[in-house]
Image (cartoon, rainbow, N blue to C red):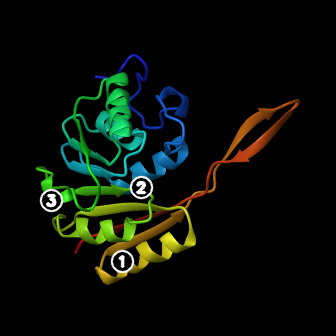
Amino acid sequence: MPSQIWSYITPGIPDELFERLPGIPLTKREVRVLILAALRLKSDGVLWDIGAGTGTIAVESGLLCPQGKIVAVERDEEVASLIRRNCDRFGVQNVEVIEGTAPECLSSISHLPERVCIEGGRSSKDILRQVWQYLPDTGRVVATAGNLESLYAISESFSDLHARNIEVVQSAVNRLEVRGMHQNFVAVDPIFILSGEKL
């Protein structure tokens, strides 16, 4: 059931509706929609959201797939609590928050994934290689990279793992904002979104 704060069935919750903590990353609305599209979620599937940050992907996925199971992995206890608060804020009840460091904590997750979202971080390459062993055939991974080094590392991992249907998209989104007396288009942080499927 849609919450009072977001009563729509479409993705793209405005950023300002989420509770935030200083310094904790938030996947911006437009980028979030691209990630959700790349995940190709199933209504009753299992998604691991690794490096869940503010919990925007977990919340949106939980709303889109109320019969599904979303596991949000976050190493910081305070940030994990933030994810739980954002789930409560939007009435999402199918998100389990795991406090732990990936890839070490992955073996303790009881629900095996069909989809995995890996959001940024220096260890994305290592995490990708570890989650691959938990995926079934036709399982899908979406990973984000904020710099060329991460882009190359994740691309190399997809290649080494013989992933199929690999796609790489760089977002280039601008928002109209009022600054002083002028209206300017301001770039939303450009990011690479990589996706691939297990054979």
Q: Circle 1: is it few (<14), some (14-19), or many (20+) Cα within 10 Å? A: some
Q: Secondary structure at mark 2?
A: loop
Instruction: Please state which of the two labelled residues, at mark 3 or mark 1, is closer to the viewer.
Output: 3
Q: Quadrant of the C terminus?
A: bottom left
Q: Nearer the viewer, residue 123 or 159?
A: 123
Residue at horizontal 20 percent and vertical 41 percent from the top: 68
Q: Residue furthest left?
A: 110
Where residue 83 sits, quadrant-wise, is top left
Q: Residue 118's spot in the image, x, y percent? A: 37, 58
Where residue 91 sits, quadrant-wise, is top left
Residue at horizontal 63 percent and vertical 50 percent from the top: 173
The residue type indicated by label 2 comes to Glu
The residue type indicated by label 3 comes to Ser
Task: Kindly identify which numbered label has been placed on residue 119.
Answer: 2
Where residue 38 sits, quadrant-wise, is bottom left
Task: Kindly identify which numbered label has been placed on residue 10.
Answer: none
Chain-order first, disc 3 or disc 1 = 3
Chain-order first, disc 2 or disc 3 = 3
Q: Residue furthest front?
A: 77
Residue under label 1 = 157
Q: Quadrant of the N terminus?
A: top left
- Asked if the residue at tag 1 contacts the one at tag 3, i.e. Cβ–Cβ closer than 8 Å, the answer is no
- Seen in the picture, residue 103 relative to 175 is either above or below; the reply is below
Q: Residue 160's spot in the image, x, y percent? A: 32, 83
Q: CA distance from mark 2 to mark 3?
A: 19 Å
The residue type indicated by label 1 comes to Ser
Q: CA distance from mark 3 to mark 1?
A: 20 Å
Q: Residue furthest top?
A: 4
Residue under label 3 = 107
Chain-order first, disc 1 or disc 2 = 2
Q: Circle 3: is it few (<14), some (14-19), or many (20+) Cα within 10 Å? A: few
